[in-house]
Image (cartoon, grey):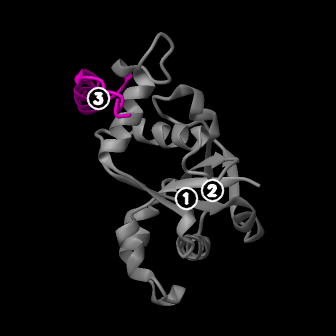
Amino acid sequence: MSYLLRAFLKNEWEKNNSKALKDFYADPITKCIKTSKNTLSVWVSSTNDFSSIEMKDLILAFASSTQQPATLDFILLDESILLSESIEIIETEGATKFYEQNEKHRDLCNLTYEKLGVVSQHIMNQFSVKENSYRITLGKILELMADAVKGDSPKIALDDLSESWQKHVKKVLSRPPKEANTAT
């Protein structure tokens, strides 16, 4: 089973909780599932475990494509359900600074007004199950990014990130290491 990871605006979608699709507020749809060329960007994952390395790497890939660090919300979509609803999913190269993850990018494509409704309803259905959404705080994403740029073979090159990301990550890297608890 494959999962599709999508960044979303949790606070916006909460407004549509317990509403029928025809009564959904427009803002979550227009702000959160804005399409380009009738496509919607997602990332494929073999796991729904947000604490896994695979998922953290996908979150880092997405974050590395943004201009500045921020708290982020993600939702897991069920690929098989979307396919059963005639939503086309194609492989497309991601455009992130985590180059090894770019092959895991997908697009929901040939979206129409009706299919966008299907995707919107699916997001709400997935959102109703707590384990399908995840918030990563600013502090945590900065720690993950700092770890990703360290070492001889970093996952992401610090110089490839935006100036804002570089500034914030350098602050994290310059902190003294946390001391291990020596209490007995």
| Tag shown at residue 131 | none
- What residue occupies the far top of the structure in this picture? 152
Q: CA distance from mark 1 to mark 2?
A: 6 Å
Residue at the image position 41 percent from the left and 35 percent from the top: 144
Pointer 3: residues within 10 angstroms few (<14), some, or many (20+)? many
Residue at the image position 30 percent from the left and 41 percent from the top: 69
User: Contact, CB < 8 Å: mark 1 with mark 2?
Assistant: yes
Q: Which percent across, then down, holds residue 93?
A: 60, 36
Q: Which residue is mark 2?
A: 109
Locate residue 136 relative to residue 122 in the image: left or right.
Answer: left
Residue type at mark 3 is Val
Front-lying residue, 163 or 74: 74
Q: Give the secondary structure at mark 3.
A: helix
Residue type at mark 2 is Cys
Q: Which residue is mark 3?
A: 169
Q: CA distance from mark 3 to mark 1?
A: 35 Å
Residue at the image position 52 percent from the left and 41 percent from the top: 56
Snapshot quadrant of residue 73: bottom left
Based on the picture, tell me whether residue 96 belongs to the magenta stretch: no
Q: Give the secondary structure at mark 1.
A: loop
Q: Which residues are magenta?
A: 160-184
Q: Is residue 40 visible?
A: no
Locate residue 11 relative to residue 62 in the image: left or right.
Answer: left
Q: Which percent across, then down, holds residue 20?
A: 53, 89
Location of the N terminus (image quadrant): bottom right
Front-lying residue, 129 or 4: 129
Q: Is residue 138 above or below residue 53?
A: below
Q: Which residue is mark 1?
A: 38
Residue at the image position 53 percent from the left and 69 percent from the top: 130
